[in-house]
Amino acid sequence: MARIEERPTVIEEETEELWGHVEGETPDSATRQALNLAHRAADKFPELSGRYKTFAGTAVIVSGALVALAGVAVARRLRRGQQPDAILDEITPDEIERAATATSRQNRIWRMVRRVARRRRDRQQEAPGGDEP
C-alpha cells in the first residue's frame, strides 16, 4: 500500500499543460490518400476487423496493426500506378494479411543481390589492375 501513496497525483491542469503544446507533422496529400484508402480497405472486410480488435476500456476499436497492414498493401498498389477505385475493388483480405510477410521476402532477395554485388566488387579490386572497369 505504501507504493500507491508514494505516487504523485496528477492534476488536470498539469495534464492539459503537458499535452497542450504537442505539435506534429501533417501528412502530405499522397500520404493522406494512402491512409484514407487503408482505412477504407480495412473497413471493407469486417472479418479482418473482428480478428484485429483492440480493447480500449469499454470501447472496442480496430487495431492499428490492421490499418498498418492495409496501408502497406495499398501503398504497394499505388506505387505500381493503380487507381484508388481499382485498388478498393481488387484488394483481398489475404493480400492485406500477407503485406508484412512479402516485405521480408523482398528484403531478403535484395540483401542477397547486394551481397553478390559486393563480392564481385571485392574480387575486381583484389585482381591485378582492379582499378580498371
Image: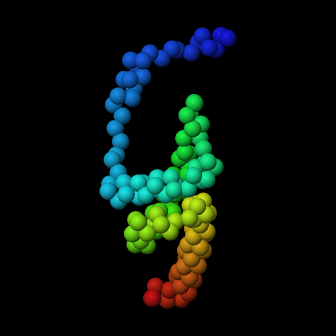
In this view of the protein, which residue sits in the foreground, 27 or 123?
27
Quarter holding the C terminus is bottom left
Q: Residue at x 35, y 42 (%)?
A: 24
Q: In which quarter of the image is residue 15?
A: top left
Q: Residue at x 41, y 71 (%)?
A: 82
Identify whether 64 is placed above or below 94. Answer: above
The image position of residue 107, as x and y in percent, is 57, 68
Identify whether 11 is placed above or below 96. Answer: above
Q: Can residue 68 be seen in this view?
A: no
Question: Could you tell me how many numbered marks the image carries?
Answer: 0
**On the rendered structure, is 80 left or right of 102?**
left
Q: Can residue 4 be seen in this view?
A: yes
The image position of residue 36, as x and y in percent, is 41, 54
List the single residue furthest toward the right.
1
Q: Quadrant of residue 58?
A: top right
In this view of the protein, which residue sits in the foreground, 27 or 62?
62
The image position of residue 35, as x and y in percent, is 42, 54
In this view of the protein, which residue sits in the foreground, 58 or 115?
58
Q: How is the image coloured?
A: rainbow
Q: Residue at x 46, y 63 (%)?
A: 88
The image position of residue 123, as x and y in percent, is 57, 83
Q: Residue at x 33, y 31 (%)?
A: 21
Quarter holding the N terminus is top right
**On the rendered structure, is 62 left or right of 131?**
right
Q: In which quarter of the image is residue 113?
A: bottom right
Identify whether 123 is placed above or below 16. Answer: below
